[in-house]
Image: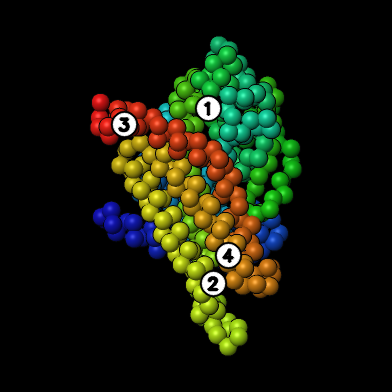
Amino acid sequence: MTVNEMQQIVEETAANFIKTFVEPAAGEIDEQETFPMSNMKEMGRLGLLGIPFPEEYEGLDQSFASYISFVRQLAGACASTAMTVVAHTCLSGHPIHSFGSPLQKTVHLSRLATGEAIGAFALTESGSGSDMASMRTRAVEHDDHYVLNGSKTFITNANVADIYLVAASTAPDKKMLGLTVFILEKGMKGISTSSKKERKLGMRGADMGELIFQDVIIPKENVVGRKNFGLEVLHETLASARMGMAAIAVGIAEEAQRHCLQYVKQRKQFDQYLYQFQTIKNMLADMEVNLNASRLLLERAVHLKDSGKPFAKEASEAKLFASETATRITKDAVQIFGGYGYSRELPLERLFRDAKLTEIGDGTSEIQRLIIADELIKRRAKSSFNPVGGQKL
């Protein structure tokens, strides 16, 4: 079977799964704030949770672009499910795939790829989010293990996960250069949750909660990469997840645009169809331009990753632009539909609520701008550009 044939099978499987299982359940998942466990297990059975992972670890060995395409389609149907998948595959599976030992991949990545285990990525704390240097969760090294103490908050999949990727400080004096990432498993003594599921504005079906660690003994073979190597693991992981978040934003925005294009050709006001009004045309034009720009930024970042080239700046660009575009498009969609858009009988108000989280999760828009500027300055410095003469020095 060729790569293209396999990719087509994956795309058809994903499309059929979304149409059969996700679309019919999306409204209920949001309304009842229920975690889509049965759909997660079905995705695992179909191989959709392991799209970018090697076959030897139960994956489908497809490109990252194929995975991102799946997330985008999934988000158009149910952003809660898409968020769960990004936390599971991108944030939990990716660091093991990229930095884990062969044993870690065999034992843990295989279970994530098949959906046998649900993954959670634990970085954020009540006093530190983007400011990783302020992390207070500590792991103290002993002869053959570490002892972990601390807590994490706003963790996607916290209450349902079987495998946790946890960042902790192992050298507090080194701040961000003293972080280490560990693999923990449900059932380890000292791990607990607050049993409180965060009640959110949007993506209500995606589980989010708090993790508490009290004298958790972690074998040294559970270190991802090596001690004090966490910053590199986190940078790579978060950059990849930002493309997942951008894909969610694009999927939400595409779905909102689709509803609008149908509605403006049916709805009349003052003896004219809505699409005949200049104001509506302007909204539709802006939707199309910004959506196309979002897609292109995302495609560029994904291509760089699949090509093995640096992609952190481009991932932040895609995440920043796509998330702000999704918020703007869903807001305009509600406006175009008027009272119908505000009603919970239609999915537009859900799309509007879901879109906002894409501007916050995996680094806020403000943080993305800092990353983009820092990377821009760093790359420009390497080119030795002379701003006065416009020539290389």
- Given residues 112 and 74, the one toward you in this image is 74
Q: Circle 4 — which element?
A: helix
x and y percentages locating residue 171 in the rendered image: 56, 16
Q: Label 4: how many residues lie within 10 Å, few (<14), some (14-19) or many (20+)? A: many
* N-terminal-most mark, 4 or 3: 4
x and y percentages locating residue 341 in the rendered image: 64, 70
The residue mark sitting in front, 3 or 1, is: 3
* N-terminal-most mark, 2 or 3: 2
Q: Circle 1 — which element?
A: strand
Residue 128 visible within the image: yes
| Relative vertical location of residue 169 with respect to residue 34 in this rendering, above or below | above
Which residue is denoted by mark 3 in the rendering?
A: 388
Q: Is residue 117 left or right of residue 239?
A: right
Q: Label 2: how many residues lie within 10 Å, few (<14), some (14-19) or many (20+)? A: few
The residue mark sitting in front, 2 or 1, is: 2
The residue mark sitting in front, 1 or 4, is: 4
The residue mark sitting in front, 4 or 2, is: 2
Q: Label 3: how many residues lie within 10 Å, few (<14), some (14-19) or many (20+)? A: few
Which residue is denoted by mark 2 in the rendering?
A: 279
Disc 3 to disc 1, how far (Cα)?
45 Å
Visual colour scheme: rainbow
- Tell me whether the residue at label 4 lies in contact with that at label 3, contact meaning CB atoms closer than 8 angstroms: no
x and y percentages locating residue 197 in the rendered image: 71, 45
Disc 2 to disc 3, how far (Cα)?
44 Å
Residue type, label 2: Thr
* N-terminal-most mark, 2 or 1: 1
Which residue is denoted by mark 4 in the rendering?
A: 332
* N-terminal-most mark, 3 or 1: 1
Q: Circle 2 — which element?
A: helix
- Tell me whether the residue at label 2 lies in contact with that at label 3, contact meaning CB atoms closer than 8 angstroms: no
